[in-house]
Image (spheres, rainbow, N blue to C red):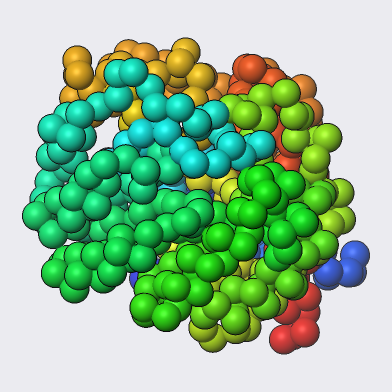
Amino acid sequence: MATASVKSHEHLDRGPFAPSNLIVRPAGTEADNAVLVIDPWSQRWAIVDSEAERILTLADGRRSLCEISSDAGLIRKGSATPEEVVDQLIGCGILFESQADHRRSGQPVYNASDIQGIHLEITNACNLRCRHCYVSSGQKLPDELSDAELRMVVDQLPSFSGRAIAISGGEPAVRKGCLDLVEYCAVERGHDVDLYTNGYKFPRRFAERLIGIAERSPGELQLQVSLEGATDATNDLIRGRGAFARTTETLEMFRELGLNRQTTVFVCITKLNIDQLDRIIALCERLDVARLHFSQWQRQGNASDVPWESIAPTVEEWLEAGERVLSYTGERLDMTGNFFGDLKNTPSGRFTLEPSLFPKHLYFYNAFPRISPDGWIFADQFWTNRDWALGNVREMTLAEAFDSPTFHAQLDAMRARTERVADCGRCIWRDLCGSGSPGHTYAEYGHLWEKDLFCDARMRWFERYADTQIERVLDAA
């Protein structure tokens, strides 16, 4: 029996339990009858023989071990006893001593969360007019939060608690007092701070002040800079003439000042730039930035009339890009990407082919709520439609927003998606996926009752992971 992970188990309780929605796939020749069994709740998996599979089928939490053992034809001559097989399955984490134990072993696709940080948009004003801007930045709004109101929001997070605050816009650097807020969050309140910027004409004096703030902050101060390609022709098609030159000048300045190791380059991938992945990677290596993250457009803001399918790479291109991320071995550049349909199976929230937990789409809806420049509370950064606002910070606290009936109704709607999407009802992966990204789906269709547009790629990654583990087990046999 091969497993993702084995833990010790020294006693058996009455009525072992396995969930009824286990995913079962062939895992070997017809002669050995081996199957890969996956628990979508706990993300544990094991490669088992037909006897173990039969025990899992019978273990409903009501039958005792004696009743399971007496099932006709269960025990083959020379095989392990049912007790031994049950011990092995419990050690694998694929069988449990009770339904309650199983419940504690995992979590649903869609989750409410303690607040881990805030995405704080401090202005809608921007010095660029990007074609894909998800909030249609440009002009300052007439009723943007004051400096005092922004600090009031920050003060709702416990100070020096390891929380993270992303400060963005618009372009936050164009707001007077932007760095005063950065300093307040980082130094006086002790939070990790990410400052998002387009890097267009970023003032050197700002960069120098950020160095001083970072030296006095107990947490981390990071910068995120947006690019759309490795050349001006590709980047400036989205961000405007001269944007590539100005942004790369800023990145060069960061390297000169030593801020490069606190910098992430953020790239939205489309069919226009996916052929430049290697060149983008090379550019980031030359600039010696710390991180490179690939994401995708959503049909909202300035891109509200641009369906994702009209600018999307092919599934094959998307998968190839994911393989490029998985195979990257550069020691100085930490590279991630949204090529895996939001699948995660590591503590850091990444997808890996290594034999740990089976990948799953885990979405912590309100872990990093977004506050718009005029104070509207959204449970997640990429929800921009006012219908999804939970209230305004001028009228309620974050705690009140996430204890409201409106928030729980939104979460319940996400959890009900697979019941209303016909394709999901026929899919073996549905309990690992939950129809995919609700935000991207809503932006694309205006409702939640479709699977997201990364479904085909995500199913290929499920299969890719399963095939990889089966191959490793067979090679080791």
The answer to whether residue 424 is above or below residue 70 is above
At 36% from the left and 78% from the top, the residue drawn is 257
At 44% from the left and 63% from the top, the residue drawn is 348
Farthest residue toward the right? 30
Q: Quadrant of residue 451?
A: top right
| Tally of marks | 0
Q: Nearer the viewer, residue 280 or 14?
A: 280
At 45% from the left and 16% from the top, the residue drawn is 386
The answer to whether residue 143 is above or below residue 285 is above
Where residue 164 appears, as percent x and y from the top left, is 28, 52
The answer to whether residue 437 is above or below residue 314 is above
Q: Nearer the viewer, residue 231 or 462?
A: 231
Q: Quadrant of residue 125?
A: top left
For residue 133, side relative to residue 365 (left or right):
right
Where residue 330 appears, as percent x and y from the top left, is 60, 83
For residue 390, side relative to residue 145 (left or right):
right
Where residue 172 appears, as percent x and y from the top left, is 37, 44
The quadrant of the picture occupied by the C terminus is bottom right
The answer to whether residue 203 is above or below residue 143 is below
At 34% from the left and 29% from the top, the residue drawn is 373
For residue 317, side relative to residue 386 (left or right):
right
